[in-house]
Image (cartoon, rainbow, N blue to C red):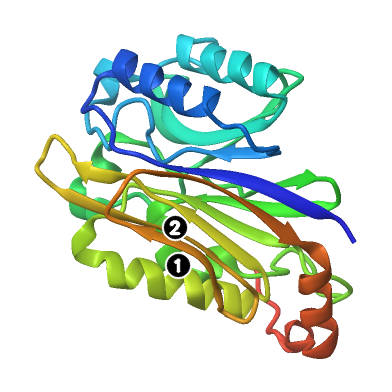
Amino acid sequence: MSTLTLTLIQTPLFWEDKGANLDLLSQKIAAIEEYTEIIVLPEMFSTGFSMQPAKFAETMDGPTIAWMRSLSAEKKAIITGSLIIVENEKYFNRLIWMLPNGQLGYYDKRHLFAYAGEDQHYSRGDKRLIASVKGWKINLQICYDLRFPVWARQGQNNNDAINPEYDILLYVANWPEKRSHAWKTLLTARAIENQCFTVGVNRVGLDGNDIAHSGNTMVTGPFGEILYHCADQEDVFTITLQKEELVQTRDRFPFWKDADFFQLL
């Protein structure tokens, strides 16, 4: 059975300062000494959770994408995180999945955080992205998506129940400290109900609106067991997940086969 090694970067972010954030993250990534295959950054890692897309958006040929491409090639690892992208005169909170060979995939956040006005500034996505690495399948989502279990549910695109659709549910976030209990609870719930690993990478520190973030970056196993958790401090942590553990869980307790089939309209 294969393994998959991820490095999770829980960091403060400089408010709406791309240069400072990319310099900080460059240092943190360069300092990773362990072998790793995927490096995970928070949501809107270059600006913080900004509602000024007209000022900070970049194209897919912009400098932050170029930065990701260069570092991914240098580290020989996938780098993922979200940033503000403009395309066809629309703004997106877009997660980039950058491969070391320079190719990329992307996912546009579907559930926009209306409580903070995100829906007034950004366009929502309508397609999921499930990436494949070494036989592992990873469902990539962003922050507020975590509250909506239908969007994350296993097997929504098939009715044959032959195999679960993905193995890891990964969230990048700027999730406030005030709702950290919901963050931790929902990451655990998504792991249990989908019989998968969940990975949630959040930022720490105050943002430009004086909103505090306590991190609580977590990795959860398919029984809901906490494999890693860090709150209230910067951390760069590397963890190796075991495919055998996942397969054994699903074989012994094949609850996923009894799930209700549904379609998103």
Q: Within 10 angstroms of label 2, few (less than 14), some, or many (20 or more) residues?
A: many
| Above or below, comparing residue 25 to residue 164 in the picture | above
Q: Is residue 8 left or right of residue 208?
A: right
Give 121 or 23, whichever is nearer the viewer: 23
Residue at 60% x, 80% y: name it: 193
User: What amino acid does circle 1 point to?
Assistant: Phe
Of residues 64 and 245, which is closer to you in this image? 245
Q: Mark 2 — residue?
A: 145
- The residue beneath circle 1 is 148
- In the picture provided, is 79 more to the left or to the right than 100? left
Label 1: element kind: loop
Q: Quarter-wise, where is residue 50 in the image?
A: top left
Residue appearing at x 54%, y 10% in the figure: 61
Which residue is located at x 47 percent, y 20 percent? 88
Residue at disc 2, secondary structure: helix
Using a 10 Å C-alpha cutoff, classify the residue at mark 1 as few (fewer than 14 neighbours), some (14 to 19) or many (20 or more).
few
State which quarter of the image contains the C terminus: bottom right
